Image (cartoon, rainbow, N blue to C red):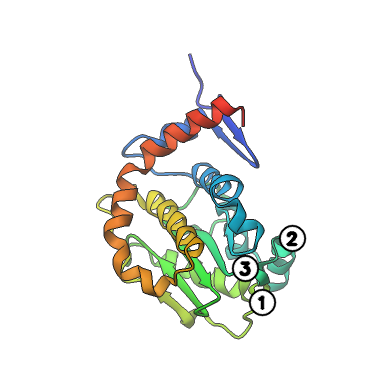
Amino acid sequence: MPSVNDKVLSYGDSCLRKGDADLLKHGQWLNDQVISFWFEYLVRDKYKDLVSSHQILLVPPSLTFILATVGSPQEASMLLETMQPDRAEVAVFAINDSNDIGAANSGFHWTVLAFERASKTFRHYDSAPGCSSASAQAARRTLLATKDALGVPSYSPDDIVEVQAMPRQQNGFDCGVFACCVTDMLCKWQAEAKRCEQQEPCMREALCREASNWRAGVQKLIGELQGRGS
């Protein structure tokens, strides 16, 4: 009988086991491993040219968590040094609302914090605003930890823009799906040289459509990558 610990896919720095892949079924809350895999796919495959040209920087959940919980600006600069964050046109952080460094997967809500250099703004995308004050606090801690590394040391948490056009999830488990979809959309906007502020008013319908199909799409993607021997 298959075990939840059976390896399903090794892809770059990410590893999905059966228990992780099962979370792609409807009604399941996504964990760090699934979101890390999605970020890895965007970096290694779908938007690799954007990443290599420093147009986009995607910081996965585990590293963002460290930055937000224990990372001082000096430590953050060291951890991010090889990614050259000060050159990134857009930097995207996967935010978990947990602040318990000793408990893996202990959070309840996923959001996205994005820094857009062209508009000089930090933008927080939350599919359930007001649901978790800890999410806003984690976003603020992430800004404080990374602003020096990003080359904007004068910024403060009060500079974060809460994106009002972000669609609202209709259940208690799709926050991770929306976080993954908005990350993909941010990359697409950058590829098309479009500003976030200009595109956000029209994002609701497209993002909801993407979110409704995302789980099935990722299940299919995993099958394709297994076939490629990734």
User: What residue sits right under mark 3 in the picture?
Assistant: 88
Seen at 31% across and 56% down, the residue is 206
Question: Which amino acid does the dot numbered 3 rest on?
Answer: Ala
- Is residue 152 at all visible to an observer of this figure? yes
Which residue is most to the top? Answer: 1
Q: Quadrant location of residue 199?
A: bottom left
* Residue 51 point in image, percent of width and height: 62, 57
Q: Nearer the viewer, mark 3 or mark 2?
A: 3
Q: Which residue is mark 1?
A: 148
Looking at the picture, tell me which residue is in the foreground, 9 or 62: 9
Residue lying farthest front? 192
Three-letter code for the amino acid on which mark 1 is drawn = Asp
Q: Give the quadrant of residue 141.
A: bottom right
Spatial distance from mark 3 to mark 2, Cα to Cα?
A: 12 Å
Q: As displayed, is residue 214 above or below residue 149? A: above
Are there few (<14), some (14-19), or many (20+) residues within 10 Å of tag 1?
some
User: Residue under circle 2?
Assistant: 82
Residue at figure coordinates x 57%, y 30% from the top left: 9
